[in-house]
Amino acid sequence: MLSAIGDAVHVLPVANALKRAWPECRITWVIQPVPHEMVRNHSAIDEFVVFHRHRGLDGWRGIHDLMHEIKGRRFDIVLGLQVYFKAGLITALLSAPMKLGFDRARARDAQWLFTTHRIPAGGQRHVQDQYFEFLDYLGVDAEPVSWDLHFSAEERAAQRGFFGSLDRQACAVVVGTSKREKNWSVAGYVHVLDHVIRVHGLQPVIVGGPSDTERQMAEEIIRRCPGKVIDMLGDDLRRLMWLVDGSALLISPDTGPLHIGRALGTPVVGLYGHTNPKRAGPYRAFEDLVVDGYAEYPGEPYPISPTYRDGMERVRVDDVLAKVSLAMERYVTL
């Protein structure tokens, strides 16, 4: 699993289950730098091979460096959890008698060509459950599902310092993603954050990455919101994690921080319209807090599917406010 923070979160219960079943096994994770920051100290992973995709022309220098690092290495099993061409190519480069991947129907970019074994065709399920199919194939029990994200003493000290400086509990807010189609509106966030301040007494804290889109949206929201909104955008993923962990509530579209929040147990109001929440929603928790703009009409019985829709305009302010109120009633202790 090279990239996609949310998908990297979904790998953690797989790694934990493998360690429970085979305590002596050695797990090596081939991963890119950004998600590596999230999982670098995870107890289930023995070794990371960091793939620098952007090195050299079209990333081929990164492939060259990876080949040098794995030269002479032999693994017993390779789990090909990511289905795009470059991940398939790396699977092909790894030496192992078993390279387990998705069934042909779900293996995008012809990933099935790079594997020796494939999980049975199981149709579309939640992404987390699809990864658990690899465990089923190997005879490993996925239960109990655990992520086990932990923080260092220094990170906990920084967390205490930040939240100790606030005069109220925080509501972490993600305003932008890597896909424009997943983003909600500035006007919508302004209304919701004003309500969060006035009605629920929480302190909004904008978290996320350093992209221009996030920066522009955050600046506009802060300028237009009547109450105080704290800007904590940046390129420090570990800081984002402890910010989400220490917040009473998270509001986010479908992106990595939403799944980090679920893994950490932070109640999350998920804003969905582009991706299918049945496939990519918070796993086994906070489904009652999902604002479902993916449905073309309330209660639409749509199937689990990787199909994208243009539905973020169906995420209405009143529906988000209702889910925030539900979260405060069911999950947040002031």
Image (spheres, rainbow, N blue to C red):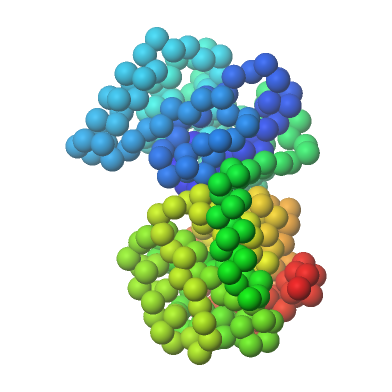
The C terminus lies in which quarter of the figure? bottom right
Residue 292 in sight in this render? no
The residue shown at (41%, 38%) is: 32
The furthest residue to the top: 72
Q: Is residue 139 left or right of residue 83?
A: right
| Front position in the image: 261 or 233 | 233
Q: Tell me residue 112's x, y (percent).
A: 47, 29
Identify the residue at horizontal 62%, vertical 38% (top origin): 12
Quarter of the image where one finds residue 233? bottom left
Quarter assignment of residue 253: bottom right
Task: Please determine whether, in this image, residue 10 is positioned above or below residue 65.
Answer: below
Give the farthest residue toward the left.
Answer: 57
Residue occupying image coordinates x 56% and y 49%? 155
Residue at the image point whose x is 51% and y is 36% from the top = 40
Q: Foreground residue, 283 or 31?
A: 31
Q: Is residue 124 left or right of residue 329?
A: left
Q: Is 5 rendered above or below residue 196?
A: above
Foreground: 309 or 207? 207
253 lies above or below 47:
below
Q: Residue 84's x, y, as percent?
A: 42, 39
Position in image of residue 75 (x %, y %): 51, 15
Q: Can you see residue 198? A: yes
